[in-house]
Every structure is written in structure tokens, then in C-alpha cells.
Amino acid sequence: MASYDLTQRIAPNLDRHLVFPILEFLQERQLYSDEQILKSKIELLNKTNMVDYAMDIHKSLYHTDDVPQDMVERRAEVVARLKALEEAAAPLVSFLQNPSAVQELRPDKHYNLQMLNDRYQIGPNQIEALYQYAKFQFECGNYSAAADYLYQYRALCTNSERRLSALWGKLAAEILMQNWDIAHEELNQLKEKVDDSKMQSRIWLMHWNLFIFFNHDNGRMQIIDLFNQDKYLNAIQTNAPHLLRYLATAFIVNKRRRPQFKDFIKVIQQEQYSYKDPITEFLACVYVNYDFDGAQKKMRECEEVILNDPFLGKRLEEGNFSTVPLRDEFLENARLCIFETYCRIHQRIDMGRVLAEKLNLNYEEAERWIVNLIRSSKLDAKIDTKTGTVIIEPSHPNVYEQLIDHTKALSGRTYKLVSQLMEHVQTQAAR
């Protein structure tokens, strides 16, 4: 299943610290050898300040208690730099640790800057030092301190670019600490900043948010809200088609699939030459080619893909990976996709010879599944126990609903064309 692993596509769009949980997952699933994973970890760690962790990995990889001299020297440099940054930021850190003093801060940043300078002799240099100190703490793996200092820094910073950088850092720290509610709040703030920015920023945002979407309540619905927006879907089609796996999964596991699902199937069809995996191919089999035998085979492959995907197969809980019931939920809804589509083109279906086989169930399981489905849904169908068939009552499409769907589709395509034109104009103007 390593051929379906997306790590090499996803990692370049993540902060390197966010890649560590993915490597831990891959090591647990044994998709790659321990040696490959450990070497990848050291390569990442060499570009951070987590020197002690790098030393531990080096010892595990080479089965020795000795570490290279350059690692020892690097550790001394990190400790010295951390001490220097701590001293530079000390006046402001001391102020922020005083609750009564912090109460003097106001939403008016210019007032705050003047007040800090007049009363505490804290100026722009100390505020900049706080940012550098927070960033260094993050690089050392002290995510809690980094998150706190970045939050305070944003309340004082007047530089929009630096505030945006601090927002990205705060989001990464909250994700790594698995504070999903806070991370979700940071996501919403960051989305407001990048909605109208360059396409690459939206691509980064979608990749980072995979951690949140598959760990936060209602995240699987929220992934549709974000990824399926025209400007985000356009970014996916242009530079990150592998993200279609996660949007496809979100559509499948949401029983109340939205009208956008029809348009999304068209995207799957358009992009099958640039990207495909068992999950996107399953949708193509069911809704494009009506290949139900192919869909049955893809369901088995989808199960393996989900189990071996770091976002779909596991979730982060208290530092450990624990199984998410997404696989069972996916398979149940995948069967529903097959059944609903098959019913649209057949009025009488043999439960044993056809349905049980297509749903990967034996006859008794298929019968129970269909009975429960008919009871819990508005499906106009009945079971003929004598002949062992499901009889589907024909339904006629509502002309008003058809008109509304066509109008929505036209509006969406118009918006997409306008957005692409605006991006082209902005690119030409920048040149």
C-alpha cells in the first residue's frame, strides 16, 4: 500500500514539525522500514532545534551510545542562543506574567505600545525579541510556550506580515498539542487572511487543516465547506489534486450529501488523468461508469487505503494513535452509494445473485441491511420474500428541483471563471 501513500506530496506543504506525527504513523503501520523512517526523522530534525531528540534517533538508528561531534556542538549553540533570546525578551515576558499589568492592555495597539514604552521601557526591540523567542521555542519543540508567546505577540504586533506568520505558528503549535477546539478557532482566523491571498497560501491551509478536519467534531462536514469552495477547489485541481482523496471521503461518509456532490463527480471525472486512487476510482465506477463490479473491487482497496492513511486511518489522542471508526463508516456509506445508484437503473433486483455480491455481504446480511435501509430512509422500495428480490417504485424527478440545480451549477461556474480571470489579472499586474 506504500504506492498510495501521499506523504511525499503532503509533506512539502506542511511545517516540518507537522511531518513528525505522519512519520510516527507510517512507522507504526510498517509501510516503510524503520531505517527509512529514522533517517527521514533525522533529516527533518537537522533543520530544527530539537537536538536532543535527534541524538536519541541517531542512537536508535546506528545502535550506539555515541553521537557525532557536530550534534554536540549544535546542541551547545542552541542552548546559548536560547539563553540570549530569553534575556532579550525577559522585560516583556516579565510584564506578560503580571496579571495586573496585563489588564492595562487595550485593543488599541498604538496605545499599548506607547504605554509599554512610557511605563515599562519596553519598545519595538523587546516586542521583536518576543517573536524570535517564541519562534525559537517552537523550533525546540516547546509548543506550549511558543503558543502562549505568539498569542501575546499578536496582541502587540502592528506588522501585518509578522502577525500572519505568528498566526501560522500558533496554529501549528495547537495542532501538535492536539488542542483541536483552539486549533479550529485559529483556522477560522487564518482563513480570513488567506481567502483572497495567493493560491499557494490556500493550498498550505488545506494541508494543515487535514489534522483538524479528521479530529474535530463535525470536521468531515467542514472539509466539504472549505475544500469545495470554488477558489479552494480550483487550487486543488491546479496544484494539489491528491487532496481529492480527502474531499471524496468526506462526501462519501456524509449521509446527507449536498447538491455539490454532482458537480464534484464531474471534477473526479476531469481529474482522473492527473490523480486517482481507489477512493476516487470508486466514485468514478459508481457514478460515471456504472461499473458495479469494479466498484466492489475498489471497496476492498479503499479499506486498505483508509487504514494506511495518517489522516483517515488514525487519529491523534493524548500522544498515541488510536483507531478511528472511519473505515466502517466509509464501507457502510459506500454500499449505500452502490445500492442507490443501482436502484436508479433497475426496478427489480435479485438480492442473492446481485445485491449481496455487489455489497460484499452474504444473503442474510444483505437482506438485513436492505430492510434497515428501507425503514430508516425515504426509499420507495419493498422486498418480495418469495422471489428474493427488491422491487423499486419508479420516481419522477421534480422539475423545480432540476431547475434549481441547473441554476446553482451555472452560478458556480460563472463565479469560478470570474475568480480565475481576477487571479490572471493580478498575476499580470504583479509582473
Image: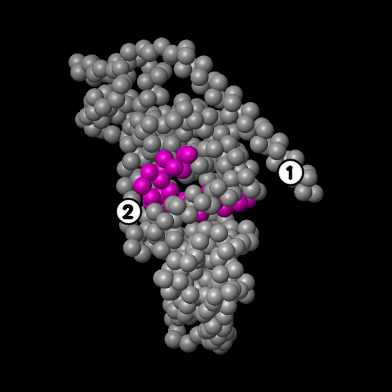
Q: Is residue 43 above or below residue 164?
A: below
Examine the rendering and report whether any part of residue 374 can be seen: yes
Residue 247 picture location, percent across and down: 48, 41
**Circle 1 Cα neighbour tier, 10 Å, few/some/many (<14 / 14–19 / ≥20):** few
Q: Residue at x 50, y 85 (%)?
A: 67
Q: Which residue is drawn at 19% across and 15% down?
A: 386
Q: Which residue is drawn at 56% across and 25% down?
A: 409
Image: magenta residue range: 200-225
Q: Is residue 162 left or right of residue 403?
A: right
Q: In this view, does 394 lie above or below 138?
A: above
Mark 1 touches mark 2? (CB < 8 Å):
no
- Residue 344 falls in which quadrant of the image? top left
Q: Which residue is drawn at 45% across and 52% down?
A: 185
Examine the rendering and report whether any part of residue 74 can be seen: no
The image's colour scheme reads: one colour
Q: Is residue 345 above or below residue 52?
A: above
Callout 2: SS: strand
* Residue type marked 2: Thr
Residue hosting label 1: 426
Q: Nearer the viewer, residue 213 or 56?
A: 213
Q: Which of 403 and 195 is in front in this view?
A: 195
| 3D distance between C-alphas at marks 1 and 2 | 45 Å
Queried whether the magenta region covers residue 55, the answer comes back as no
Specify the label residue 323 is tagged with.
Answer: 2
* Residue type marked 1: Gln
Q: Nearer the viewer, residue 112 or 170?
A: 112
**Circle 2 Cα neighbour tier, 10 Å, few/some/many (<14 / 14–19 / ≥20):** some
Residue 297 picture location, percent across and down: 41, 37
Residue 169 picture location, percent across and down: 53, 62
